[in-house]
Image (tube, rainbow, N blue to C red):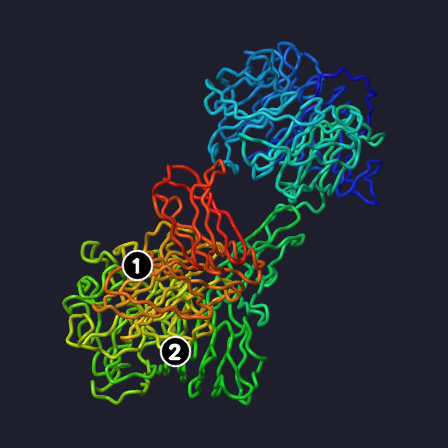
Amino acid sequence: MKKIFFITLILNFSIINAQTPCSGGSAGSYPCDGLDLQSYFSLSQLGATSGNDSWGWTDPLDGKEYAIVGLNNSTFFIDITDPVNPRRLGRLMSHNNSSTLWRDVKTYNNHAFIVSEASGHGMQVFDLTRLRGLTTNANRTFTADAHYGNFGDAHNIIINEDTGIAYVLGANIYSGGPHFINITNPTSPVSMGGYNGKGYTHDAQVVIYDGPDPDHQGREIFIGSNEDEVVILDVTNKSSVQVISTITYSNFRYTHQGWFTEDKRYFLLGDEEDEAMAGIGNTRTIVLDLIDLDNPSIHFYHAGTTAAIDHNGYVRGNRFYMASYSAGVRILKVDDIENQNLTEVSYFDTYPSTNSASFNGAWNIYPFFESGNLIVSNYNTGFFIVKDPNYDNVDPVIVCQNITATLDKTTGTVTVNPIDLDGGSTDNFGIVNRSITGQTTFTCDDVGESFDVTYTVEDDYGNSASCVATITVAAETTSYLGAGVWSNGTPEVGSNAKISTNYNTSAIGNGSIDACTCEVDASSTLTIAADDYLNITKDIAVNGTLIVEHEGIVVQTDPDASVVNNGTINVELTTPVLQNRDFMIMGSPMTSEIRNGVFTNAFLVLNHDPSNFIPHPGVPAGGTNFADNNGDFWTTYNGAINVGEGYIVRPQSGYTDPANITYDMTYSMGTLNNGDVTRNITYNGAGSNPDGTPNVLANPYASPISADALIAGNSVIDRVYFWEHLTPPSTSIPGYGSLNFSMDDISMYIPGGALPAANDPGTSTTPNGIISTGQGFAIKAFAGGVGNEVTFTNAMRLTSGNNTLRIPEEGVEKIMLKVRSNDYNIGSHALVGFNPQASEGMDELYDADRLATTISLYSHLDDGTGQLGIQNRGAFDPAIKIPMGFASQVEANASFTISIASIEGEVLPNSTVFLIDNIANTVTNLNTTNYTFTSGKGVFNSRFTLQFVVDSILGPLDNLFNSISIYPNPTKEFLTISSPLAYISNLEVHDIRGRRIAETIEGKKNNYTLDLSSLNTGIYFVKIETDLGTVTKKVIKD
């Protein structure tokens, strides 16, 4: 209570010895809600004219409860063990028989420690065990057991019972800051100094901190109300007190007192004078958020139900007990404080005449008796004992039950409510809150798993009990009964699809299955037909037969799910049409397949050793090479089929098998692969393989996978290669063997595009980004070892496209050019794409070097570097010019033809495509005419330029002017003018001042070359007159 002189009427009441229940809003003459009046002593019955602080003591020997009541002239001791008939035991007079309005008392180790603002009072120590066995005697006077006189007057005393340190506050030393006293030996207090760094402290709480801020856990923390701010100190070291932080708040008047919530997250603070301010309104409680002691914040301001002034308040359990002067005792629940809610649940008005903002009524409340008795000391009326008749300090009796939580088949989820886990819990006054700690919402990912959660019940006073319950998650079963009928409807995401009789996805009324789990009963067969799928999130249990036909699909989502094979699982695969010496690159979708299992009829199976690969020198240099130099890259194999590895398989019975037939294979050993499949990658060094080391892999799943996802998920892969079945082996093809396959049969895929095999006869071997079941492919590795493995994951699996269909991409502009020899049956392709995700430079996922084919058409970057089989630029620009090159290993001077193989997108199909031959000085419209040229053996970089005119966007003159180009620019001597859409009729060259330097008039030509070698270095302008119009372009002469 602030030091204010009070002029007040001292009211005298007679003792109330009979309990007065709160009924109809009152207990006798006292307004109330939820609190009964146990008994009352007036001030005159306590021999005083005013009251102040109060505290309590419970005798550890017998559990008896005693009230210690501060009065103006003494400290009174009352046995309240029988709260309806309390017994006055006597008083300890103020030191030197002084009198004052302010006295404060706390207890420690069965002793009371008393301070007062009376001059020279010091600290009295009283042994509370002296109250044992005393008879009632209101006139008994005690003497102190000890006196500490190192200070005179003081306002308050706080004791940290965990350390045995008393903190005397507002004393006439240390500027009113805390004075530290060691009271571990109560009757021999020892000074430990004090702290004056933050001035006067009115009240405080001191704890060994176990709150949410890890920086201060285990430290002794002092939170002081210092009149105009809250001060947080670390007082662990009494000789070196540290200021952690301070905080104030709006409209402060007198920062009085506060208390932590039990979890020490929040601090409830009272200002003793703010209610008297205009605009504050009802009783204001300031709630601080102390999750970070270094940075405290205002959580919210709570407005009470009356205009009374708040004084002392304490938190016990889930309640805040507040002495609110003229409004008496107010009790608020704090269990929703996180959401900025304090709820008044009961009150007892000890000063009925008014609830105004005046200093009358309840000074202090002590709420810490286990009996639930609340003692209230009134400043100007007396001493009250009140109690909630529903007070509860007994924990509930909890009973858990384990449950199975079944998913909703449509949503695929289930949420467990707390009551679901209750097996008959009880409480003496009733359970008001139930909660679960742990996972409560489950999906198909959780099916088959068991989860231990903690179930907690709580009564109104926050007493709680907990137990552990087990939740087992299951899917909702629907059984196939035949004739298109399911017992619980068609399977959905939350279903367990149970195959109780034969089911074929291709049968009338049937189809693909999407479900959480799947069971195939014994004697039942589930057949997944071509283009259909079984898409299961979790486990598949095969007790009967599962047949995955050729191009059928089985996908699992959960990488940890299993496929339990207690019956038969067959995955069927049919090869493309093969010739008598053709082979397949293949892997296995099963866990335990062996060479003499699925490939038992194949006369030859080879595996590879990347560490032995040396590129054959006979293959054209500068491109990707898969031809080995000495024949030890592939070797005969007879062991287990390693999951994820690709093998050469010749499914024929011998080299002389008939041509033009397919071969059927059935994988049946082990069970279906699922989850992550990791393959080690070998790189045998740039010296041996400057273009990377081939590693041969295979799709390990009974489903197609996305090549884009495979590349994105593995840093060691930037493109994949496929062997197409186009050309029979020949003695004329470079390689180690007497008969070798052609590098021109390899197709290539990167996320930016794809190239068909150079020998593609028009059957479309362009990869579409899908790798089918069992399909093998190669990568070129430029790194290997730990950290450079290739991992296949379920995220790459697809539910369609298990037939290697060639599906064009959408949203990207692309043009594929092909070159064919007119004299030999050889060819090549070059792809140029325009993709907003690509750049003008070299992009790992969008550009790829050309293959080392016999003849090659390729593109360059703008600076003329690179020999790219696939190149992606940024977004399409009609003015772009793509430099292109050509290479030939044909010894003779031969004839070749360049044509458009394909063109895709929204703009390019409506554009005119021009090919400029920079050697022959010709321009060809490839939309209407293929271009034929001759070339000898060699590499001819930048021989061609690819150029576009967008007819649907530009007008005729725009098209004309954009199509005219001059190069090189800058130039040292010769300048070529190219005009693919109009004939050049006249040329003029002017200097920067407009003077004509040179002029020429020639016959009609699309291309013309000027000799500028005689001109000085500078900037010039070339005026180009055509039969359709005139344009001027700037040229720089070096």
Q: Is residue 671 left or right of residue 372?
A: left
Residue 256 coordinates in the image, percent (x, y)? 67, 24
Which residue corresponds to mark 2? 763
- Frontmost residue, 501 versus 711: 711
Residue at the image position 57 percent from the left and 17 percent from the top = 198
Residue 113: image x %, image y %? Answer: 58, 22
Q: Count the labels in the image.
A: 2
Name above or below for residue 432 compared with residue 183. Answer: below
- The residue labelled by disc 1 is 789
Dot 2 crowding, Cα within 10 Å, few <14, some 14–19, many 20+: few
**Residue drawn 53% across and 24% down?**
233
Residue 105 visible to the viewer: no
Q: Is residue 873 left or right of residue 285?
A: left
Residue 707: name its quadrant: bottom left
Quadrant of the drawing holding the C terminus: top left
Q: Is residue 492 left or right of residue 932?
A: right
What amino acid does circle 2 point to? Thr
Res 370 seen here: yes
Mark 2–mark 1 Cα distance, whole angstroms, equals: 34 Å
Camera-nearest residue between 772 and 51:
772
In what element is the residue under mark 2?
Answer: loop
Where 797 falls versus 1008 (above or below)? Answer: below
Left/right placement of residue 614 relative to residue 868 reads left
The quadrant of the picture occupied by the N terminus is top right
